[in-house]
Amino acid sequence: MLSAIVGINWGDEGKGRIVDLLSENYDIVCRYQGGNNAGHTVINERGKFILNLLPSGILRETTVNVMGNGMVIDLEHLTGEIERVREKGIKITPDNLKISDKAIICLPYHKFMDIIEEDRLGDKKFGSTRRGIGPVYADKYMKKDIRMEDLFDEASLREKIYDLVEWKNITVKGYGKDAVNPDDILAWLDKFGSVIKPYVTDVSKYLYKACDENKNIMFEAQLGALRDIEFGIYPYTSSSTTLSAYAPIGAGIPGKQIDCSLGIMKAYSTCVGEGPFTCEMFGEEAEELRRAGGEYGAATGRPRRVGPFDVVASKYGVLVQGATEIALTKLDVLSYLDKIPVCTAYDIDGEITTDFPSGVRLKKAKPIVEYFDGFGEVSHCRTYGELPENAKKYIKYIEEAVNCKIKYISVGAERDEYIEIK
Ligand code: GDP
Ligand code: MG
């Protein structure tokens, strides 16, 4: 079975936690897009892990993890991440970590370009994570990146890097910055590439074979539907395709189709970085929710913007992710509220709509907020029956509003703190 586990909202829905929970049932977990611009937090009996690049299945002993061709990989970051995870007793070998030979390498100058451009933009910045993701994907489509496979031929790598840096320095000069030295890039590639090379392989061959053997494969998304480059809140999106439909392509098995798309949806809303966030709350109300949910970025530590559950955005997220079922996360965080706000529709120049808009119309949208009765403590609940009536009402309402069945409800960050609805 091929399943995608994807974000329905703006990211940070708790995907890492759900993948960790469900990865037990899968032989293989694949990452298919993005780089180290996001973080998944996983807490289990072995400790707390923040994973930026490694698939969350790395924490299960028998799971094989794949980093697909759709990813952009900063070798230095990956080296550090492997070390940090290993320090906690996790085994990482070429048997349980396979990196696509076609995955793109995110170079130090991509990070540099990201930073100097965000700084140039000042007030108009995109809210980039400054890790080079936008620039490296842009270069991918210019066909001016190097891929993992390039690490294996020293002479051609040298030639490529010299050519690329010469081209890149035209832009660097335009910013009034010191030219990049190609030998520095080559030294960096040598230092970190030598650590990563043993994991690089033809993952497509491995995955097609796994499909033939009816292995269970899970595709793990990073970031949510609303950050998708094409269907998200462009231009405040990521630079890659975060949607489930892209999963087989980004992982390395184009032509295969997913059987199931599990959408991870948060019981309220959060958003990191810039861009329209219609349901946003401010002031003390926001601060309380942020504190209750511990809403500070896993990758960057930035305080996340927060708001109530957004029906309009979530219904859209469910649609574009082709979600066949939902895991609703962080329900416990709402326990402190007497009245639970929900953004049920948008008002755009006086027109009330539940269709998610884009562009200027999205910027103009104002939230219409309704209130549900609070439900108190839920973190102890392990079955649907144990949930307070008002929590059931909230869940039922959401299920109908987004038009998708809720299969899991997460009531805490620990591995066992969840409810499966049978
Ligand atoms: P991801 O990027 O989608 O994997 O999500 P993040 O890891 O960035 O953010 C989710 C945060 O919420 C992490 O700190 C998790 O440990 C935590 N978390 C996940 N599920 C729950 C839950 O049901 N309740 C609570 N209280 N925390 C949760
Ligand atoms: Mg995250």
Image: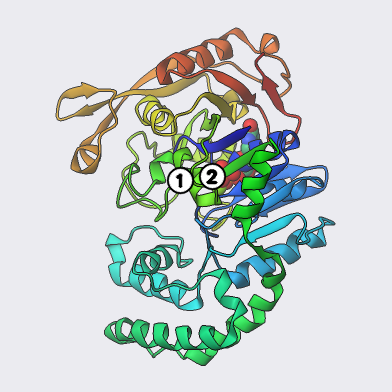
Tag 2 secondary structure: strand
Q: Position of residue 127 (x, y in %)?
A: 38, 58
Quadrant of the frame with the N terminus: top right
For the residues bearing labels 1 and 2, Cβ distance under 8 angstroms: yes
**For this view, does 381 lie left or right of residue 263?**
right
| Residue at the right extreme of this rendering | 89
Q: Which amino acid does label 2 sit on?
A: Ala
* Residue labelled with disc 2: 221
Q: Which mark is residue 34?
A: none
Tag 1 secondary structure: loop
Residue at 66%, 20% (x, y): give it.
Answer: 377
**For this view, does 126 lie left or right of residue 297?**
left
Foreground residue, 159 or 178?
159
In terms of sequence position, does the residue under pointer 1 or pointer 2 come before the other? 2
Q: Position of residue 120 (x, y in %)?
A: 30, 72
* Residue labelled with disc 1: 242
Foreground residue, 222 or 67?
67
The quadrant in which residue 333 appears is top right
